[in-house]
Image (cartoon, rainbow, N blue to C red):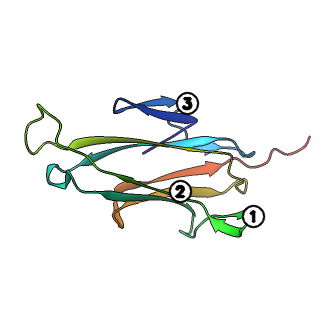
Amino acid sequence: MLLCDAAQVSEGKLYILGGGWSMTGPDPVPSAVALKIDVDWHEAEVAHHWELFLEDADGRPVMVDTPEGAQPVEVRGEFTVTHPPGVPEGSPIDVALAVNLGPIPLAPGVRYAWRMTIDGNSLPGASLGFTTRPVPSEI
């Protein structure tokens, strides 16, 4: 997982713009989460469900106002891989995902984290923390 300004997947590769940051704001700006997932060989041909959850430092969902009321910031999707020709049996299979997000209004000077699950399971390294900068003081 990598925080970036924007990301795109083309021909199985991740293209990342402004990647590797851990501080943003304080004003809301577009951002993205670039993901490279290694799928076990025996998990090919099986549909997998993934979810990204934005949480505060205490692990609570971050809520944003929508026309339907306050909603948690969450992104969901599915992927299925096939056995690539010429790849030795037992090799992990790459999946690249790019999740581009519009500006999310976040409180300044606060720690947040994106947490990912696949098929309902949290995986090692499947959390990505970042901090919003405090509002500059007026001089």
Q: Between marks 3 and 2, how big is the CA–CA gap?
A: 18 Å
* Label 1 element class: loop
Q: With respect to residue 135, does 123 lie above or below? A: below
Q: Quadrant of residue 47?
A: bottom left
Query: Dot 2, how many residues are within 10 Å of its Cα: few (below 14), some (14-19), or many (20+)?
Result: many
- Residue lying farthest to the right in this orientation: 139
Residue at image mark 3: 18
Query: What kind of residue is marked 1?
Result: Pro
Query: What kind of residue is marked 2?
Result: Ala
* Label 2 element class: strand
Q: Do the residues bearing badges 3 and 1 touch, measured as CB atoms within 8 Å?
A: no
Q: Do the residues bearing badges 2 and 1 touch, measured as CB atoms within 8 Å?
A: no
Residue at image mark 2: 113
Residue sitting at x 23%, y 56% = 46
Position of residue 51 measured from the top left corner of the image (x, y, whole percent): 44, 59
Q: Between marks 2 and 1, how big is the CA–CA gap?
A: 25 Å
Q: With respect to residue 16, does 23 lie above or below? A: below
Q: Which mark is residue 67?
A: 1
Query: Left or right: where does residue 117 sit relative to residue 92?
Result: right
